[in-house]
Amino acid sequence: MSKFQEYPKLMKHPSHQDAQWKTLEGKGVGLFAPDTIMTSPERFPDVTVVDLKQEQYYASRGYRPNNIADSVQYEQAILESAPVNGYGFKEYPKYKYHNFYIPVIVQNKSEEMVLGDGWEDSPIIATEDDFMEEVEMESKPLPERGERTETHKENQKVDKRSKEYRDSKHPA
């Protein structure tokens, strides 16, 4: 369910007037159509405010909110709304978020399981503890170039025609 947000908010002025347009006399279509000119500009156009300070500024000039809503009314409206025809919730694909890695999209449960621990369904707000974990991870020495780690060996593709593979399957 979406959360209630008061801003951005649309404000209207009670003395609002639309712009007035006039098409000049003449014949033609397309590029040769008569010109249209504005005879009177829009007065007191609608404004969108993004915080309380802007709302107070425009309210002092006569603007009023388009609707007066609060979080209780919003939640009630969401609960009473009818489901959209033809929509069915699908769990996948979905984003997964991690403290240190960029978000990824997983297509199914198996891809989600491959990610391992630390991945969440919603963005993670980092704390001081997370920073300390990152510092500890950075302090660990990295393997030398060309050196294989245990996880790398497990994930490495094996050429079944190689001598190492044959020797590992058929010891002498």
Image (spheres, rainbow, N blue to C red):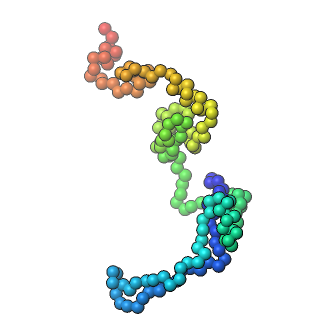
Q: Nearer the viewer, residue 15 or 146?
A: 15
Q: Quadrant of the C terminus?
A: top left
Is residue 70 among the parts visible in the rendering? yes
Question: Residue 141: percent from the left, percent from the top?
Answer: 47, 21
- Determine whether, in the image, residue 28 is placed left or right of residue 38: left
Image quarter of residue 118:
top right
Image quarter of residue 30:
bottom left
Work out which residue is located at the far right of the displayed protein and give it. 72
Question: Residue 129: percent from the left, percent from the top?
Answer: 62, 31
In the image, residue 133 above or below residue 65: above
In the image, residue 41 above or below residue 125: below
Residue at horizontal 59 percent and vertical 60 percent from the top: 83
How many numbered discs?
Answer: 0
- Determine whether, in the image, residue 73 is placed left or right of residue 165: right
Residue at horizontal 55 percent and vertical 52 percent from the top: 89
Is residue 76 among the parts visible in the rendering? no
Question: Residue 6: percent from the left, percent from the top?
Answer: 66, 59
Residue at horizontal 60 percent and vertical 37 percent from the top: 126
Q: Nearer the viewer, residue 68 or 119?
A: 68
Residue at horizontal 52 percent and vertical 60 percent from the top: 86
In the image, residue 142 above or below residue 7: above
